[in-house]
Image: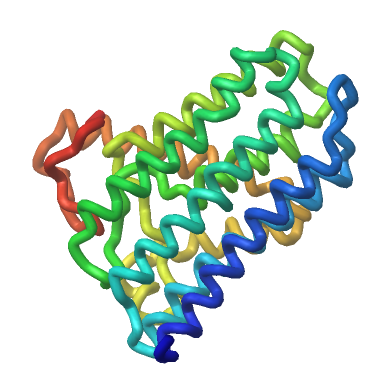
């Protein structure tokens, strides 16, 4: 096998996959049917998924630095993302809550994994450029995973909802996130920490920086509110642009058509 400079970003991509696998193993080891999942197990699995997100971000940065972006890298990244940000969160949902609902719970817990596969398959076949764009079509899979795991860890475990409200809220969040992934709603591609990115989109840059700092300062408590805001703002902007066609912007990584599951 010929070793090229693309091996460096690919190793970071595989590290992403390893973290997703570690999150799944953590949940399986900590799960006992009929017993509530421990806080420590959920925290460890969440940290693995967050670490997978860090590697997922770094592989793209490094690929551009060493000028080794390629279709192979895109395909490898998508395969790894399916495990880390699709299957792993679905396993977490099932082990922490939906196992109580047996077959219906299994179906609901699988929705993020199914949506992630559809989202990434569409992304790959409609990819138009290796360069950074302003928007993605559909909620990015890592962002969806972060929304779900932060809800599980910081909201679902909080003692302010009754059992009925907890079940309804969990179901709504899972369906909303899965639907956002397979939709054609435009979601912001988070800007890279560069002066050029700040000049191009100062508001998005500042909000992203504030979200990061507050998430660190609150030890993760601020993650879900910001991710929920990210999901809602994209949907509201989509509705506004449907109403006002002159406001539509096309600067995305994907071609608009054909789309097998447009929304």
Quarter holding the N terminus? Answer: bottom left
Image quadrant assignment for residue 75: bottom left
Q: Is residue 173 visible?
A: yes
Front-lying residue, 190 or 199 = 190
- Mark count: 0
Q: Position of residue 125 (x, y in %)?
A: 23, 52
Q: Quadrant of the C terminus?
A: top left
Residue ID at (78%, 12%): 162
Residue 98 x %, y %: 69, 22
Which residue is located at x 55 percent, y 68 percent? 14
Q: Measured from the top left, where is residue 156 in percent x and y?
A: 74, 29
Q: Quadrant of residue 181?
A: top left
Q: Is residue 82 left or right of residue 212?
A: left
Q: Position of residue 66 (x, y in %)?
A: 40, 90
Residue in front for this viewpoint, 9 or 249: 9
The single residue placed furthest to the top in the displayed view is 164
Q: Residue at x 32, y 34 (%)?
A: 183
């Amino acid at each position: 096998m010929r070793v090229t400079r693309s091996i460096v970003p690919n190793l970071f991509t595989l590290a992403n996959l390893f973290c997703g696998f570690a999150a799944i193993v953590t949940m399986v080891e900590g799960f006992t049917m009929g017993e509530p999942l421990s806080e420590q197990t959920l925290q460890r699995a969440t940290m693995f998924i967050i670490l997978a997100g860090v590697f997922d971000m770094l592989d793209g940065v490094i690929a551009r630095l060493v000028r080794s972006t390629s279709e192979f890298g895109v395909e490898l990244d998508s395969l790894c993302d399916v495990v880390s940000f699709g299957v792993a969160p679905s396993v977490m949902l099932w082990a922490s809550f939906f196992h109580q609902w047996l077959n219906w719970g299994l179906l609901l817990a699988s929705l993020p994994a199914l949506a992630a596969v559809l989202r990434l398959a569409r992304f790959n076949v409609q990819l138009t450029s290796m360069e950074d764009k302003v928007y993605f079509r559909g909620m990015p899979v890592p962002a969806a995973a972060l929304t779900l795991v932060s809800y599980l860890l910081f909201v679902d475990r909080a003692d302010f909802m009754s059992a009925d409200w907890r079940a309804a809220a969990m179901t709504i969040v899972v369906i909303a996130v899965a639907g956002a992934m397979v939709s054609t709603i435009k979601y912001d591609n988070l800007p890279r920490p560069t002066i050029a990115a700040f000049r191009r989109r100062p508001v998005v840059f500042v909000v992203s920086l504030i979200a990061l700092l507050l998430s660190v300062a609150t030890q993760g408590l601020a993650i879900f509110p910001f991710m929920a805001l990210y999901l809602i703002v994209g949907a509201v902007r989509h509705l506004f642009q449907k109403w006002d066609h002159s406001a539509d912007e096309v600067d995305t990584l994907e071609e608009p058509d054909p789309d097998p599951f447009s929304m």
